[in-house]
Image (cartoon, rainbow, N blue to C red):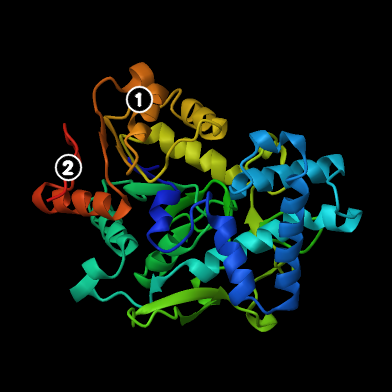
């Protein structure tokens, strides 16, 4: 188990180009209009937008933010459950959640811009995630006897920005999706799934199978100003597609809808959630970056409460976010647990990483303790 747990939200991935939930559908529409020419992918996008149009005719839309991807995803799941959504036939309705996952997959992969290769001499200019991985490396170099990893990452993000940089830096990732998985990697626990996770095609097997870095291909980002930038694609070559139970895995990504029945959903990564709770139980330092703690996210509130119920009390709890109201939300979540040791800084992800990295350069990493949060230099 880890002593230092990082929690990453959408604000962290936004700096890699991934759109926030509130504007993901606008970005997806632009992609459909200007970039997507594959007929199957195009059909999935079109069905999603048809479903959104149907939702606009429902009176309850006065309480639904139809510009927010998670809100729409939840409505589609409910529509499938109730077998009811205007203007869609039964086939379209039943396939709508899968089409939404296709839209998420394509939107995330087509917008994430990453360093092609890490260059140690100019690491600070590669990406915020490159600097973040440097922090993970420094902390793990000072792990104590018996510790597998000094730190772990819990994330709500679907994208591969962190995964790619870890892969490029030579660090294996431990996703905790399978009891047989190599546990020597850095824990990257994706609570809502990931665009590189899929399911075994065998209907009697429910195993989640990650597509690891050797199964990815890269294409130029199209940004003329960024020579060292690429986008990731999962291979289309069936010969290189991961296999499980002796056959190629499904192409549909494991992405968990943000709905009230999340824990009972067939895609729920239960082992990942249990591992996240275990990491929180042993955490002595918790650092949150870019996660706004939405009022509707009861899942994380329960996960945190139960994960820390019988664990050690964290020595400090830091929160970094550009929105100053986020600090107040976390203070309310923590209550008496962290009357001392809590601090908030109005910083975006890259600024937070810079501040923490600067502190590590000045302090003894083996004693990662601080009374006040590091400030940017």
Q: Is residue 338 left or right of residue 24?
A: left
Report the residue at 34% width, 47% height from top.
151
**CA gap, disc 1 to disc 2?**
19 Å
74 w.r.t. 204: above or below: above
Q: Tell me the quadrant of the picture where the N terminus can be found.
A: top left
**Element under disc 1:** helix
Question: In which quadrant of the rendered view does residue 131 lie?
Answer: bottom left
Report the residue at 86% width, 52% height from top.
87
Instruction: Residue under label 1, please give it.
Output: 331
Q: Which mark is residue 348?
A: none
367 w.r.t. 123: above or below: above
Report the residue at 58% width, 47% height from top.
68
**Element under disc 2:** loop
Q: Which mark is residue 374?
A: 2
Q: Residue pushed farthest right?
A: 90
Report the residue at 35% width, 40% height from top.
323
- Say which of 217 and 175 sits in front: 217
- Say which of 272 and 303 sits in front: 303
Position of residue 139 measured from the top left corner of the image (x, y, whole percent): 25, 51
Q: Is residue 366 left or right of residue 13?
A: left
- Number of labels in the image equals 2
- Say which of 279 and 182 sits in front: 279
Q: Sequence order check: which comes first, mark 1 or mark 2?
A: 1
Q: Is residue 247 visible?
A: no
Position of residue 89 measured from the top left corner of the image (x, y, whole percent): 90, 55
Mark 1 crowdedness (10 Å alpha carbons): few <14, some 14-19, many ≥20: some
Q: Is residue 86 left or right of residue 167?
A: right
Position of residue 369 measured from the top left corner of the image (x, y, whole percent): 19, 37
Question: Are the two marked residues, 1 and 2, in contact with CB atoms closer than 8 angstroms?
Answer: no
Position of residue 134 measured from the top left corner of the image (x, y, whole percent): 26, 60
Q: Residue pushed farthest left?
A: 362
């Amino acid at each position: 188990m880890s002593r230092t747990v990082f929690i990453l939200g959408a604000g962290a991935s936004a700096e890699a180009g991934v759109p926030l939930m509130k504007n993901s559908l606008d970005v997806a529409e632009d992609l459909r209009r200007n970039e997507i020419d594959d007929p199957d992918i195009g059909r999935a996008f079109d069905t999603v937008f048809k479903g959104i149009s149907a939702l606009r005719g429902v009176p309850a839309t006065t309480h639904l933010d139809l510009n927010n991807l998670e809100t729409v995803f939840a409505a589609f799941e409910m529509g499938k459950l109730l077998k009811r959504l205007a203007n869609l036939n039964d086939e379209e309705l039943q396939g709508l959640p899968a089409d939404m996952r296709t839209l998420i997959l394509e939107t995330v992969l087509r917008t994430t811009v990453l360093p092609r290769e890490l260059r140690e001499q100019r690491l600070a200019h590669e990406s915020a995630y490159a600097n973040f991985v440097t922090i993970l490396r420094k902390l793990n170099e000072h792990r104590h006897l018996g510790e597998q990893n000094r730190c772990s990452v819990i994330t709500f993000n679907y994208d591969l920005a962190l995964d790619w940089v870890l892969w490029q830096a030579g660090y294996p990732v431990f996703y905790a999706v399978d009891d047989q998985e190599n546990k020597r990697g850095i824990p990257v626990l994706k609570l809502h799934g990931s665009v590189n996770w899929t399911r075994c095609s065998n209907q009697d097997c429910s195993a989640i199978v990650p597509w690891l870095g050797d199964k990815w291909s890269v294409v130029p980002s199209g940004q003329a100003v960024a020579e060292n930038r690429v986008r990731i694609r999962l291979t289309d070559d069936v010969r290189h597609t991961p296999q499980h139970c002796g056959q190629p895995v499904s192409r549909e990504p494991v992405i968990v809808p943000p709905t009230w029945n999340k824990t009972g959903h067939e895609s729920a990564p239960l082992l990942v959630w249990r591992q996240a709770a275990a990491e929180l139980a042993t955490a002595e330092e918790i650092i949150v970056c870019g996660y706004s703690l939405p009022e509707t996210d009861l899942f994380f509130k329960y996960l945190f409460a139960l994960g820390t119920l019988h664990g050690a009390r964290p020595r400090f709890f830091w929160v970094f976010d550009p929105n100053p109201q986020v600090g107040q939300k976390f203070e309310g979540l923590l209550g008496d647990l962290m009357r001392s040791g809590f601090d908030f800084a109005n910083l975006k992800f890259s600024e937070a990483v810079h501040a923490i990295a600067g502190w590590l350069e000045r302090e003894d990493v083996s004693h990662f303790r601080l009374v006040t949060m590091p400030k940017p230099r």
